[in-house]
Image: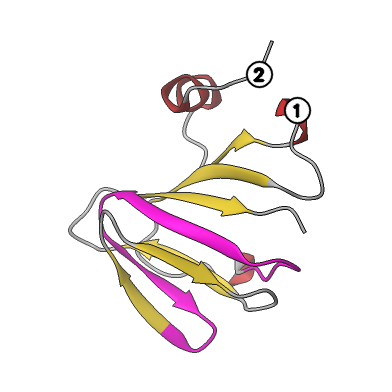
């Protein structure tokens, strides 16, 4: 049987966390392949948790509006927007002040 998950069930079972893994090694991903959803509720960048990864990371904005700080550049995020963060580049995200949250799908491809 092929393992699967449903986003609404993952969020319901995990409470008010900000990040939710959807697919990772538990569902058969290998070599660092994984994906999930993050929900940004902060209106300021949390630079203490800004991250850089050894692989590129792709994003797709699902709901809400926000901003992404990617290295020294800032992107305005809105639903339907896709973008990539190159490997090794520090990035952080936040919601706009007039939105309750910004929900973003993210993925790391296997390397």
Tell me what residue is drawn at x 47 percent, y 34 percent: 16
Crowding around mark 1 (Cα neighbors within 10 Å: few <14, some 14 to 19, many 20+) is few
Crowding around mark 2 (Cα neighbors within 10 Å: few <14, some 14 to 19, many 20+) is few
- Contact, CB < 8 Å: mark 2 with mark 1? yes
Tell me what residue is drawn at x 77 percent, y 34 percent: 25
Q: Position of residue 21 (x, y in %)?
A: 61, 37
Q: Nearer the viewer, mark 2 or mark 1?
A: 2
Q: Earlier in the sequence, mark 2 or mark 1?
A: 2
Task: Residue under label 2, please give it.
Answer: 3
Q: Secondary structure at mark 1?
A: helix
Horizontally, residue 35 falls left or right of residue 101, namely: right
**Quarter of the image with the C terminus in it:** bottom right
Tell me what residue is drawn at x 26 percent, y 63 percent: 96
Q: CA distance from mark 2 to mark 1?
A: 9 Å
Task: Residue under label 1, please give it.
Answer: 26
Q: Point out the stretch of residues depicted in magenta.
A: 51-73
Q: Position of residue 89 (x, y in %)?
A: 63, 79
């Amino acid at each position: 049987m092929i393992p699967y998950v449903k986003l609404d069930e993952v969020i319901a079972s995990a409470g008010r966390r900000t990040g939710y893994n959807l697919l990772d090694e538990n569902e058969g991903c290998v070599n660092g392949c994984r994906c999930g959803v993050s929900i940004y509720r902060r209106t300021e960048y949390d630079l203490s948790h800004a991250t850089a990864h050894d692989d590129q990371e792709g994003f797709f904005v699902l709901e809400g509006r926000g901003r992404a700080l990617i290295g020294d550049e800032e992107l305005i995020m809105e639903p339907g927007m896709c973008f990539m963060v190159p490997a090794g580049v520090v990035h952080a995200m936040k919601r706009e002040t007039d939105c309750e949250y910004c929900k973003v799908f993210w993925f790391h491809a296997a390397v």
